[in-house]
Amino acid sequence: MRIAIDIRRAGDFGIGTYIRNIVNQLARQDDATQYLLIGQPKHLDELDKLPENFELLPNVPDLGSTADRLRLPLTLRQRRVDLLHLPWFQPLVLLPCPVVVTVHDLTTILFEPKYKGMRHAVRLYLARRLFAKAKRILTVSQSSKRELARSFNIPEARIEVIYNAVDERFTRDPLPADADRILERHAVNYPFVLYAGNIKPQKNLPRLIEAFAVAKAELREHPELSQLKLLVIGDELTKHPDLRRAVVRTRVREDVRFLGFVPLPVLRVFYARARAFLFP
């Protein structure tokens, strides 16, 4: 059996973590199936060393390009792929084989700001076509399952909820001395709460900043948490002026820090030392 998996977002934050763990675990547990990975050599750098039953498809076009939508179905047909797994929603319809698609949430389908008017209508049409063709739709929460069924008139029997697991790289606590050194390097010598993820509009970071400002006001006299700060790990603040405005408007400019992207060992320390992880 030949299964193709699109890994072109293996370097991303959340979806990248999902892809990396799917492929790495399959590599450990299945040596009988032939896996064809849709991606480029740089995407393999995000994965563990893979066994011989995993193959990178050559000359894969850039994600989302016209060539992608036309050539990928042809490649799948030529390689006689039995099943395609799309680890995130992609508006592909000219597929020559059964498909399983994972939908993490519906915000990028229903509320993506860059798709307006006719582009939004076309995107919804392609989503309905893909979901109608899919042999199975995977999602990560009961809420997303209900929303999928309601928004696209999909029988719930075709939607399966598989909860996200913990990335094993975060199951080991960092050594205290290493953690202290990393926090010192980032000038973090105060209690903090943490947000880690992308900063797209649907993540609602301005409201998170507003909520943090309210909490700060209530903790003003607390003997320890009066120094509490919010650390945001993800994208660069310069790309999101609305967040800068939210920080200024709520008067927590000195208490909110945007650290941008950090390497995994650093991220693990921030997870371990945070007083709370915030997920709006």
Image: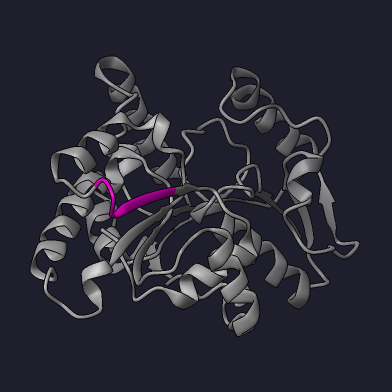
> At which x and y percent is residue 204?
24, 47
Image height check: is 200 above or below 178?
A: above
Compared across the picture, whether 221 is left or right of 127 comes to: left
The front one of 200 and 276 is 276
Q: Residue at x 71, y 38 (%)?
A: 76
Image height check: is 263 above or below 128?
A: below
Q: Residue at x 24, y 63 (%)?
A: 143
Residues in magenta? 253-258
The quarter of the picture where residue 276 lies is: bottom left
> At which x and y percent is residue 19?
60, 57
The front one of 80 and 4 is 4
- Residue 52 seen: yes
> At which x and y percent is residue 100?
52, 54
The front one of 196 and 72 is 196
Compared across the picture, whether 46 is left or right of 135 comes to: right
- Residue 172 seen: no
Q: Answer whether residue 17 is magenta in the image.
A: no
Q: Name the quadrant of the C terminus.
A: bottom left
The front one of 8 and 216 is 216
> At which x and y percent is residue 178?
65, 76
Q: Residue at x 24, y 17 (%)?
A: 117
Q: Name the quadrant of the N terminus.
A: bottom right
